[in-house]
């Protein structure tokens, strides 16, 4: 609650600053590029995917070296720093969401089938005693691997959107819905729904992330207001960054507190901050991160297999804590990304051989 309250106070002060000095600032909005894809959101998803890996690396190091306080507090800092990742995935998943022909076909083909295959394989690899009932429970709740809870969570949002699409996309209600979902999400973060909802449902509760879903819809409906951030706005983001960084160090390094994935203000702040620095971002690095974001499903589903296998090896065996962290990060992002490259090239080769127009 202390971290949530701090975020709300800082966000309130920032809003007051923008209002008092009449600084022009518009909500981020999508733009369709010449290739028909909004690559900036792929960059955001790329950062989020790397962040998810960093969260799990902390657990990996903690598993082997719980008594090595200095190292564990450092990995905890990077884990807490990355807690914007899941909210950012929910947000970007909602931006271009529309109920059109093939809505469920694409969700089943691109998400549910890969998740099902990964869950089946993962269940037989990770567990020793197999029962259909246990697998179905793990599958529905996303418990085969810890990160898999995201798929049942996202599927609930897809169902929610399919049912209430006309209401959610109505410009007349979007701002009111944004406020309502913020309050609902805040109530969920404070544990108000814990006694009402089944305990097994807590981890995949849509109330934990419903504000970010609605924020994504709001961004998807927004237009370019021709406002450009001024130096004062950049200064504001810079100031907030150092304030958050200070408290991240305190909470992680001093108190050893492990943050939740669904704090409200911190992920929203990181989203806006990254959005502001994207135009100044190194183009080559942005292309790499964008590719990771575009193929995030591969990394999301395959990374748990990599980190699970690595639990047979002490991370320090890769050259100590520092090199061990770097190697673990590279392997958990690089191996699934490499598989994504191979699959993409295979698809392109298959299409070029079977769909060439006859001469």
Image: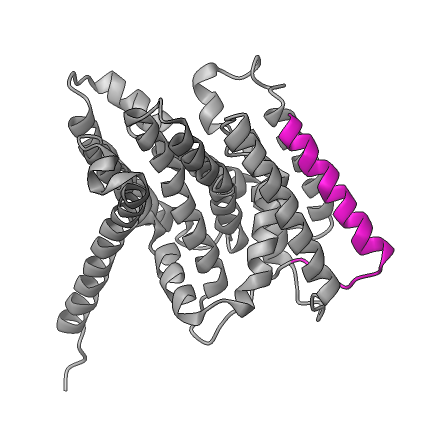
Q: Most prominent secondary structure in the magenta stretch? A: helix
The answer to whether residue 50 is above or below residue 28 is above
The residues colored magenta run: 1-27
- Seen at 52% across and 26% down, the residue is 257
Name the quadrant containing residue 251.
top right
Q: Which of 80 and 243 is in front in this view?
A: 243
Query: Camera-side residue: 348 or 298?
Result: 298
Q: Where is residue 5 in the image (x, y as percent from the top left)?
A: 69, 31
Q: Is residue 15 magenta?
A: yes
Q: Residue at x 60, y 55 (%)?
A: 273
Q: In this view, does 339 lie above or below 10?
A: below
189 to the left or right of 84? right
Q: Quick check: 142 left or right of 264?
A: left
Question: Along the line of sight, which residue is nearer the eye, 342 or 107?
Answer: 342
For the point 36% across and 42% down, the residue is 53
* Residue farthest along the top direction in this orientation: 195
Residue 10 lies, in percent from the top left, at 72, 41
Q: Can residue 26 be seen in this view?
A: no
Q: Can residue 2 be seen here? A: yes
Q: Quadrant of the N terminus?
A: top right
User: Disc count in the image?
Assistant: 0
Relative to 45, residue 129 above or below: above
Image quadrant occupied by the C terminus: bottom left
Tell me which colouring the rendered structure shows.
one colour
């Amino acid at each position: 609650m202390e971290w949530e309250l701090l975020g709300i106070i800082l966000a309130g002060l920032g809003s007051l600053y923008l209002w008092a000095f009449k600084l022009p600032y518009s909500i981020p909005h999508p733009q369709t590029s010449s290739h028909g894809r909004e690559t900036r959101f792929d960059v955001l998803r790329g950062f989020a995917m790397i962040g998810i890996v960093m969260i799990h690396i902390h657990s990996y190091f903690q598993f082997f070296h719980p008594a090595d306080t200095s190292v564990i507090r450092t990995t905890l800092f990077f884990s807490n720093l990355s807690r914007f990742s899941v909210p950012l995935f929910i947000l970007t998943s909602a931006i271009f969401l529309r109920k059109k022909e093939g809505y469920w076909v694409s969700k089943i083909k691109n998400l549910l089938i890969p998740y099902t295959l990964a869950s089946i394989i993962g269940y037989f690899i990770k567990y020793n005693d197999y029962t259909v009932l246990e697998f179905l429970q793990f599958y529905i709740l996303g418990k085969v691997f810890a990160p898999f809870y995201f798929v049942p969570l996202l599927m609930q949002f897809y169902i929610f959107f399919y049912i209430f699409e006309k209401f959610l996309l109505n410009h007349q209600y979007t701002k009111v819905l944004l406020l309502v979902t913020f309050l609902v999400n805040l109530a969920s973060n404070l544990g108000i729904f814990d006694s009402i909802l089944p305990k097994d449902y807590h981890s995949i509760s849509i109330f934990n992330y419903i504000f970010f879903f609605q924020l994504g819809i709001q961004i998807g409906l927004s237009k370019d207001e021709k406002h450009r951030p001024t130096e004062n706005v950049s200064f504001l983001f810079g100031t907030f960054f150092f304030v958050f960084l200070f408290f991240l160090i305190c909470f992680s390094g001093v108190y050893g507190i492990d943050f939740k994935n669904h704090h409200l203000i911190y992920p929203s702040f990181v989203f806006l901050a990254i959005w502001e620095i994207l135009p100044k971002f190194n183009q080559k690095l942005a292309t790499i991160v964008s590719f990771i974001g575009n193929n995030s499903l591969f990394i999301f589903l395959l990374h748990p297999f990599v980190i699970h296998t690595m639990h047979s090896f002490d991370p320090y065996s890769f050259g100590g804590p520092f090199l061990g962290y770097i190697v673990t990060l590279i392997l958990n992002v690089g191996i699934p990304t490499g598989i994504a490259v191979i699959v993409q090239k295979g698809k392109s080769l298959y299409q070029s051989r079977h769909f060439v127009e006859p001469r």
